[in-house]
Amino acid sequence: MKIILTSLVLLPVFAMAQDAAPEQPSLIGAFLPFLLMFVVMYIFFILPKQKENKRTEEMRNTLKKGDKVLTVAGIIGVVAHIDERFVSIKTGDTKIDFEKIAIIKLLEADAEKREAEKK
């Protein structure tokens, strides 16, 4: 009799204990914060860098003789000769050869023509 009464009293306690047990989150719910963090990082960091790299590569491919450029080393000069892979830059009386990849910025297009017009 005591066992039956004890089990009847404890039955609601066990039922509530099972209801109070936390449920396992779904797989999507567990990875959702990481997914959102990756999307934000892609939008704010990766996408702009890809666009910048595309513009720089396009600028390097459209270089022509007479353009004033800035190199990675900080040298400013005028393009004297362009090859498939190399660029000759004239700075003062000196010509320096660089790889195209060393050109980071186009300062003025056809700078030699503008300098000749000034004189």
Image: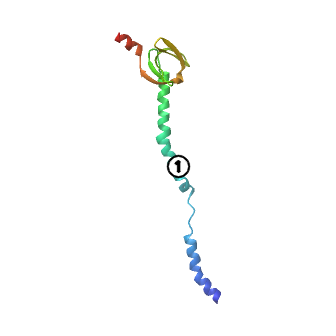
Determine which quarter of the picture holds residue 78. top left
Residue located at (57% from left, 73% from top): 17
- Out of 70 and 86, give the one closest to the viewer: 70
Q: Tell whether 112 sits left or right of 29.
A: left
Residue located at (46% from left, 41% from top): 44
* Above or below, 2 relative to 30: below
Residue 112 placement (x, y as % from top left) = 41, 13
* Above or below, 20 relative to 5: above
Q: Residue furthest left?
A: 118
Q: Residues within 10 Å of mark 1 (few under 14, many from 20)?
A: few
Quadrant in which the C terminus appears: top left
Quadrant in which the N terminus appears: bottom right
Residue 45 placement (x, y as % from top left) = 48, 40
Determine which quarter of the picture holds residue 69. top left
Q: State the residue position of label 1.
A: 35
Residue 64 placement (x, y as % from top left) = 46, 17
Q: Tell whether 25 sits left or right of 66.
A: right
Q: Secondary structure at mark 1?
A: helix
* Above or below, 89 relative to 15: above
Mark 1 residue type: Leu
Residue located at (63% from left, 86% from top): 4
